[in-house]
Amino acid sequence: MSFLVAGVDEAGRGPLAGPLSVAAVILDPARPIVGLNDSKKLSEAKREALYPQIIERALAWCVVLIEPNEIDRLNIFQATMTGMSRAVEGLAIVADEALIDGNQLPKDLPCHGRAIVGGDALEPAISAASILAKVTRDRLMVTMEAKHPGYGFAIHKGYPTPAHLAALTLLGPCPQHRRSFAPVKRLLTP
């Protein structure tokens, strides 16, 4: 059996609403995927085209969501670390090593870990995780628009754009807003 490496990345640390999405992916060296890169450097159409290829060709993959109430309870950094550990634990195959995008490692990873700054552009497995996390979260935010109309989630995906901040001021926070994030917290504090 070869040395199995899981790439791990997240999407959604900065938004004011919606979950944090964290993915772990073990790629199959025998089934390479052309075009992998940091999800932020790819168009939405390219991410959507790569998503099914990753799902189909990876040896294992797992996406976990950390909901806004857990983000508020833990803080965004701890929520990210927790999500990374859960994603690696959720893989159907045990990884020998997890390559984490960033400069911090979760303390409770179920295998050896290595943090790689800018890893989503350097390591194909992290790029694949980046794409799964982002596409999963973006799709969820589009469906959230129907449940919470008026905020524009389908467009800005929960990020603090001027339009989102205006809607937040007008409508107040919905259940998907992160209460611990300053623009939301300000509206809740009399």
Image: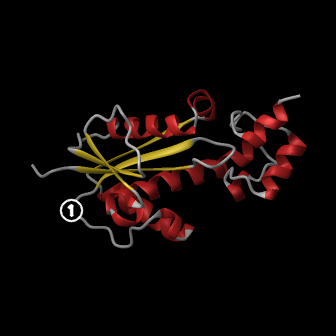
Disc 1 crowd rating (10 Å Cα; few below 14, some 14-19, many 20+) is: few
The amino acid pointed to by label 1 is Pro
Question: Residue drawn at (71%, 38%), measured in percent from left and top?
Answer: 177
**How many discs appear?**
1
Residue corresponding to mark 1: 29
Residue 183 percent across, percent down from the top left: 77, 43
Q: Quadrant of residue 112?
A: top left
On screen, residue 72 above or below 62: above
Residue 104 percent across, percent down from the top left: 41, 45
Question: Residue drawn at (84%, 49%), measured in percent from left and top?
Answer: 167
Residue 93 percent across, percent down from the top left: 24, 41
On screen, residue 117 above or below 97: below
Question: Residue drawn at (80%, 57%), measured in percent from left and top?
Answer: 162
Question: Residue drawn at (20%, 49%), measured in percent from left and top?
Answer: 4
Quarter of the image containing the C terminus?
Answer: top right
Look at the numbered disc 1 and give the secondary structure of its residue.
Answer: loop
Q: Specify how the rendered protein is coloured.
A: secondary structure
Asked whether 80 or 68 is in front, the reply is 80
Classify residue 145 as left or right of residue 188: left
Residue at the front extreme, as displayed: 103
Classify residue 155 as left or right of residue 115: right
Q: Quadrant of residue 147?
A: top right
Asked whether 66 or 145 is in front, the reply is 66
Classify residue 137 as left or right of residue 154: left
Residue 109 percent across, percent down from the top left: 32, 35
Asked whether 26 or 12 is in front, the reply is 12
Residue at the left extreme, as displayed: 1
